[in-house]
Structure formats: C-alpha cells, structure tokens
C-alpha cells in the first residue's frame, strides 16, 4: 500500500498543551490528519506528536513531507 495523497495543502489544527496526537502517515484515515487505525496490516505507522503549548499546528495533508508530521511545503511539488 502506498500513502494516499489526501490534499495538496497543510491541515491546520489547534493543539492543546500536553496532549498527544497521532498523525496518519498512510492517508487512509477518516479522521484526518489523525490516525484511525486504517493502516493496520501495512508497513505504515502513525507519528506521535505531543504539544508543548496551546497553538496552531500545520500538519502535512499530502503525506509527502520530510518533516513528519508537519507540513514542509512538499505539496507544492505535486
């Protein structure tokens, strides 16, 4: 299974300090940008992110980033 390009833009999320988030790396989750277990049985794993403050984070939507789970602008090359 190859990662699914969900969208060619970042996904903005307000995160809460101290909370753990699990970013979907496969693109199959119905709870984007977060994992819902759709990767089960594949080589994909969710990427854990723990917020160190309350703020807006731009998670990668295209799943091509080199700075998982954050957007690095890779969607501009698709």
Image (spheres, rainbow, N blue to C red):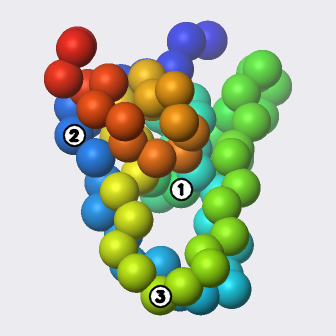
The residue under the point 46% across, 47% down is 70
* Vertical side of 41 occupied by 60: above or below: below
Task: Judge by depth and name the residue closer to the eye, 53 or 43.
Answer: 53
The residue under the point 76% across, 21% down is 42
In primary-sequence order, the first of circles 3 and 1 is 1
The residue under the point 40% across, 81% down is 55
The residue under the point 22% across, 14% down is 77
In primary-sequence order, the first of circles 3 and 2 is 2
* Vertical side of 28 occupied by 51: above or below: below
**Tag 3 near tag 2, CB within 8 Å:** no
Question: To which residue does mark 1 refer?
Answer: 34
The crowd level at tag 3 (other Cα within 10 Å; few <14, some 14-19, many 20+) is few
**Tag 3 near tag 1, CB within 8 Å:** no
Mark 2 or 1: the one toward you? 2
The crowd level at tag 2 (other Cα within 10 Å; few <14, some 14-19, many 20+) is some
Question: To which residue does mark 3 refer?
Answer: 54
Q: Is residue 19 left or right of residue 33?
A: right
Measuring from the top left, give residue 34's x and y in whole percent: 53, 56
Q: Is residue 55 left or right of residue 28?
A: left
Q: Is residue 8 left or right of residue 62?
A: left
Measuring from the top left, give residue 61's x and y in whole percent: 35, 40
**In which quadrant of the rendered view does residue 6 lie?**
top left
Task: Judge by depth and name the residue closer to the eye, 16 or 38.
Answer: 16
**In which quadrant of the rendered view does residue 73 lie?**
top left
Measuring from the top left, give residue 37's x and y in whole percent: 69, 47
Provide the secondary structure element on which disc 3 rests.
Answer: loop
């Amino acid at each position: 299974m190859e990662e699914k390009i969900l969208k060619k833009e970042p996904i903005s999320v307000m995160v809460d300090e101290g909370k753990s988030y699990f970013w979907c790396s496969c693109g199959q989750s119905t709870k984007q940008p977060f994992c819902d277990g759709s990767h089960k049985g594949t080589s994909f794993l969710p990427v854990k992110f723990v917020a160190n403050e309350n703020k807006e984070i731009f998670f990668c939507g295209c799943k091509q980033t080199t700075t998982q789970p954050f957007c690095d602008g890779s969607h501009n090359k698709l």
